[in-house]
Every structure is written in C-alpha cells, then in structure tokens.
Image (cartoon, rainbow, N blue to C red):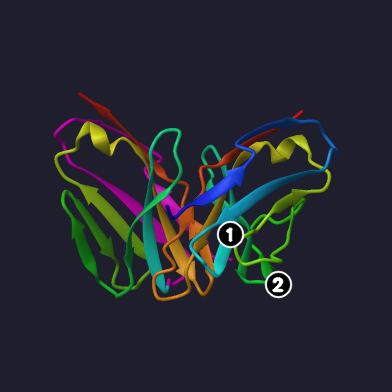
Amino acid sequence: EAQVTQNPRYLITVTGKKLTVTCSQNMNHEYMSWYRQDPGLGLRQIYYSMNVEVTDKGDVPEGYKVSRKEKRNFPLILESPSPNQTSLYFCASSARGRTYEQYFGPGTRLTVT
Amino acid sequence: GQQVMQIPQYQHVQEGEDFTTYCNSSTTLSNIQWYKQRPGGHPVFLIQLVKSGEVKKQKRLTFQFGEAKKNSSLHITATQTTDVGTYFCAGRDDYKLSFGAGTTVTVRA
C-alpha cells in the first residue's frame, strides 16, 4: 500500500531534550516536505527536499533541522525543543511532475513542556 | 514572500445548503491545489487548477481559478454530513507550496 509513515504519532517531551520525528514513504517520490499545523494558521512549511542531499528552508525553519540521506526517508530533528514548537506535524511527499500532488502522513502530535 | 489568505475561517451550514470558500494570494500563482482534512485526519488532495479561469467539477464540488491566477474558490452544493472537515487551498510558486489557514466546515443535520 502506497503510504507515508511517521513516528512517533504522539510525543510529550521537555524543553531542551533533542528529538527526531521520522518520516518514510514507499512511493519512490523525489519531493518531501515537513509542515506544522497550528489552529488558525493552517499548514506552514518547515523544510522541503527536492531529492537526496537537496534540502531547503520553508516558511518556518527556525529551531528545526532535516536531512535527506536516502530517497525514502526525511527525518525532522529538533535539537533543543521549546514550548512554542508544540504542534501537529505532517510529513508529505510527492512525485516530480506537473501536479506535485502531496501525500501526507498521519501526523505527529508533539507537546513540549 | 507569498501569502495565501482563505475566508471564511469557519462555515456552519445547514444540510442541503450551498456554500463557498475563497482563497486569495498576494502573488500570481503557477497553480493552486485544494485539500480536505477530516477531523483527526491528515490533508488529502482534492484537485489542482493550472490555467487562468479554469473551472473543474467533482460531483457537488466546483473549483475555480481566477483570471489573474491570484484567487480561487470552492463551491459545494447540497452540503452533506460527509462534507464536514477543513478545506485548504495551497498556492504553488516554483517548488514551494503555501497553504491558506483553511475553512472548517460543520453541518447541521
């Protein structure tokens, strides 16, 4: 089944404790992206990657890191999480082409206390 | 940078009625996409509009892309309880996709 998976789905952590949210897709998509969703703000892009070893900042990259060492994986790293990073995070992937229809993962709800 | 504004933020609809949600961009877009997110779920792609003035229909949903490619609308006729959720527009400029804040739709049976 074609899908985007994220782990963990729920995470409660404390300020400053490094964490990684994994994202994996099995559709051989070149393009992957991370978003955060906050009430009233919609989906804001954090980082995106056009292909292996190619990443770029989205609209809200501060406090986040990403890497794209393999085509299928695009982990999101929070080196020193802060409470303002409490949010719902979505990973998405799409094939290169005319549409760039994005396939979203199920989401990761992160709480930083 | 590119900004995409979406109105209204909330839409409470009587079952069977029609409604429209609007999307406006501060810049000209290469295309616009629409997504639907059910409560507790993830966004799911509905459609993409590319051409100026383009109109596409999916059953009771009608999508329009403005002539200047800076605005779009989604019109739903005869709303059903299955239409509940948040509808997002997303404007694409090169490889970046900017989402509107979404319109959250509730339906009164």
Q: Residue at x 69, y 65 (%)?
A: A68
Residue B5, percent across and down? 45, 53
Residue A9, percent across and down? 60, 36
Residue A51, percent across and down? 61, 72
Q: Quadrant of the N terminus of chain B?
A: bottom right
In the rendered structure, find residue A53 and report the number of the disc placed on it.
2
The span from disc 1 to disc 2 (Cα, nearest Å) is 13 Å
**In which quadrant of the rendered view does residue A45 lie?**
bottom right
Q: Is residue A54 above or below residue B99?
A: below
Look at the image and say whether residue A6 sits in the magenta stretch. no
Q: Is residue B77 above or below residue A75?
A: above
Side of A29 where B88 appears, left or right: left
Q: Residue at x 18, y 41 (%)?
A: B18
Q: Residue at x 31, y 35 (%)?
A: B84
**In which quadrant of the rendered view does residue B68 lie?**
bottom left
- Residue reaching furthest to the front: A1
Q: Residue at x 55, y 42 (%)?
A: A107
Say few, some or many: other residues with alpha carbon within 10 Å of mark 2 (under 14 / 14 to 19 / 20 or more): few
> Which amino acid is tagged 2?
Glu
The numbered mark, 1 or 2, whose residue comes first in the sequence reads 1
Say few, some or many: other residues with alpha carbon within 10 Å of mark 1 (under 14 / 14 to 19 / 20 or more): many
Residue B96, percent across and down? 54, 67
User: Judging from the image, what secondary structure is the residue with disc 1 in?
Assistant: strand
Q: Nearer the viewer, residue A6 or A90?
A: A6
In front: mark 1 or mark 2? 2
Highlighted range, magenta: B1-29
In the rendered structure, find residue A33 and report the number of the disc placed on it.
1
